[in-house]
Image: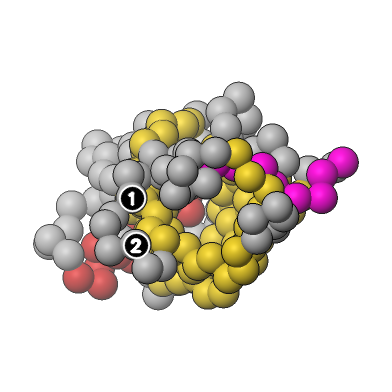
Amino acid sequence: MGEFRLNIGKTRRGGPRRRKLALGALLVAAGCALASPAATAGDAKETQITINFVETHDRLDPDPRPGITRSATIEATLSGNGQIHENNADYIKGNAKRNKPGNGMRQGENDEKLGDTATRVVWRVDGPHKLQRLLVGKQFIMVAEIEVVQDASCSVEIKYLLQKGYTDVVMRRRDNGELAKFSLPKVLNSSCSIR
């Protein structure tokens, strides 16, 4: 893939006009069909996509614990030069204290280039008005399919897939840091916003 540029014309702060211009620039940069007539070559702006989701999984034998629920937020900022910066956080139900960003999925802060497949988290164009985010782990792949629509809104579908040859996921327990086996996470709900 080539280099992408996000170019947005000057607008008043906030509001639907700015979101539409940001959306137009995002989709143009991603090689999609929607373009904003107000986009100019001189004013590169940032576009932020926020994904929120809740998932559940079970800790398996020898110390089983069913129904572990986790909420997570992925905040991706797309800059004018095609760079994507993520600042993510996740939360375990029943844990009043916020966990360190990305502690469960080891995401934290990431910087990627749109279309770069050499990184652990890959953002790519998946069709007209669609972006895809892939998190490639040793035992699983997390796939987030993001669809952006003309009214500056978006929807997201998130799923986990086991890598070939694996039947479960091995990761560290949050209570004691020891390695344990877990079921593949299932997403209970997800939402997306763009600005």
The residue indicated by pointer 2 is 95
Q: Is residue 60 above or below residue 45?
A: below
The amino acid pointed to by label 1 is Asn
CA distance for labels 2 and 1 = 8 Å
> Tag 1's secondary structure?
loop
Identify which residue, 147 or 141, lies in the foreground: 141
Residue found at x 69% / y 57%: 60
Magenta segment: 165-172
Residue 25 visible: no
Residue 48: x and y, percent?
33, 53
Identify which residue, 129 or 11, lies in the foreground: 129
Residue found at x 52% / y 46%: 173
Left or right, 163 with reference to 29: right
> Tag 2's secondary structure?
loop
Residue found at x 54% / y 65%: 68
The residue indicated by pointer 1 is 99
Left or right, 174 with reference to 47: right
Determine whether label 2 and label 1 are within 8 Å by CB: yes
Place residue 158 in its image quadrant. bottom right
